[in-house]
């Protein structure tokens, strides 16, 4: 994966707006619990959910926040640091900690993962 190129990622989000796409979103302890040091394991995982977003936006300065405006709400991921557009033209976004471990992933595809 490469460090985020904000302009390139925004262009890819714009290409996927108003299209039926499949979402993969996950977090691990590093995304929300690590800075609290509570010892409480937390996480979230959603895969192959079909969504249609009106607008996608990447904002911030590394790490970034990526938001997808849906008809009745939002999907967003904070802490995004890296991206890849794979051989299937899927947009893969990830937040990696300094050790390279995954903290958050937001991935979009026109076909199921």
Image (cartoon, helix red, strand yellow):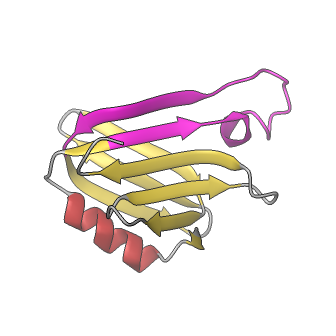
- Name the residue rendered at 59%, 37% in the picture: 27
Residue depicted at 19% across the width and 43% down the height: 52
Q: Position of residue 10 (x, y in %)?
A: 35, 70
Q: Looking at the picture, how far across and down is residue 2, in whole percent? A: 58, 73
Q: Nearer the viewer, residue 70 or 4?
A: 4
Residue at the location (35% across, 59% down)?
90
Rendered location of residue 18, percent (x, y): 13, 53
In depth, the one of 6 and 46 nearer the eye is: 46
Q: Give the range drawn in magenta.
A: 23-52
Residue at 62%, 62% (x, y): give it. 63
Query: Would residue 8 be found to the left or right of residue 13 on screen?
Result: right
Quarter occupied by the C terminus: top left
Image: 99 above or below 49 = below
Question: Which residue is farthest front?
Answer: 87
Instruction: Give left or right: position of 40 versus 32.
Output: right
Tell me, yes or no, whether the highlighted magenta stretch contains residue 40.
Answer: yes
- Provide residue 84's location: percent of width, then percent of height: 48, 67
Name above or below for residue 18 compared with residue 39. Answer: below
Give the quarter of the image for residue 42: top right
> Nearest the camera: 107 or 71?
107
Is residue 64 inside the magenta stretch?
Answer: no
Residue 92 placement: quadrant: bottom left
Q: How many marks?
A: 0
């Amino acid at each position: 994966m490469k460090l985020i190129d904000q302009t390139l990622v925004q262009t890819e989000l714009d290409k996927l707006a108003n299209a039926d796409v499949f979402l993969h979103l996950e977090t691990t302890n590093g995304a929300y619990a690590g800075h609290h040091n509570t010892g409480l394991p937390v996480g979230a995982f959603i895969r192959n959910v079909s969504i249609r977003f009106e607008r996608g936006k990447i904002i911030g300065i590394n790490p970034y926040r990526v938001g997808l405006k849906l008809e009745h709400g939002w999907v967003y991921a904070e802490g995004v640091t890296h991206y890849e557009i794979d051989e299937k033209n899927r947009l893969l976004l990830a937040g990696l900690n300094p050790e390279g471990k995954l903290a958050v992933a937001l991935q979009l595809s026109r076909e199921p993962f």
